[in-house]
Amino acid sequence: MSTFDSKAAGWDDDAKRARAVAVARAIGEAVPLAGVTDLFEFGCGTGLLSLALDPRPPRALLTDTSAGMLEVVRGKLAAAGLTGWEASSLDLTAEEGPEARFDLVVSLLALHHVHDVPALLARFRRLLRPGGWVALSDLDDDEGQFHDAHTHRHHDGFDRADLAGWLADAGFRDVTFSTPHVVTKAVDGVTRDFPLFLVAAR
Ligand SMILES: C[S@@+](CC[C@H](N)C(=O)[O-])C[C@H]1O[C@@H](n2cnc3c(N)ncnc32)[C@H](O)[C@@H]1O
């Protein structure tokens, strides 16, 4: 059972919707979404990011390891009548993933749960058609301040230069960064800003 299962039903709130919308908008500025037919999302949670893309691609595979999150997102897909969209249990850090190929791989705040990010980027590349894109968002290096001590993660945010290097090693080019959103929260009584990066590459 995933630790996210118990959080799934109450996951969506205004703050999480706002950050997903901001990142989706930045993806639309970095990637020609009109040309995207098949979308893949890693660590989709309740589907906030992919569902906020505008335009929405005709087909999507949203993946997560949490059964609770997948139940919520499947309910949303059915309610929206998105017949070309599917939500599937998949851990791309442990499995090769589907035979199908995609035009765009997106992710929001899931990379910090992954130990070997360079290996995952190589898997993303294998999922893509020639000329396909990745658009990935997570925290900039947060010096261990963003999550509490009990939250499972492998990274306290990321250094942008490290990510750019890992993307280049995985065969991506045209790497660009933006800062679509800043999360503000109190840490030990002090209000701090935690920027989210979006990195796009193809
Ligand atoms: C912080 S939540 C973010 C959820 C969603 N992307 C959002 O922004 O609202 C991280 C998500 O990544 C998922 N996750 C963590 N490790 C994963 C893995 N190896 N494969 C697929 N999903 C994973 C978790 O189950 C969880 O739903």
Image (spheres, rainbow, N blue to C red):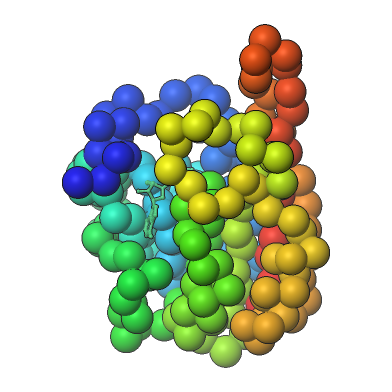
Q: Residue at x 49, y 62 (%)?
A: 115
Is residue 98 positioned above or below 36 on the image? Answer: below
Is residue 112 positioned above or below 165 on the image? Answer: above
- Residue 131, position in %: x, y? 62, 85
The number of discs equals: 0
Is residue 126 positioned above or below 111 on the image? Answer: below
- Residue 50, position in %: x, y? 46, 52
- Residue 105, position in %: x, y? 51, 67
Q: Is residue 80 left or right of residue 157?
A: left
Of the pair 50 and 164, the residue shown nearer to us: 164
Question: From where the camera sits, is residue 64 visible?
Answer: yes
Asked which quadrant contains residue 96, the reply is: bottom left
Q: Residue at x 76, y 59 (%)?
A: 160
Q: Is residue 22 left or right of residue 111?
A: right
Q: Residue at x 70, y 40 (%)?
A: 143
Tell me the quarter of the image containing the C terminus: bottom right
Question: From where the camera sits, is residue 85 visible?
Answer: no
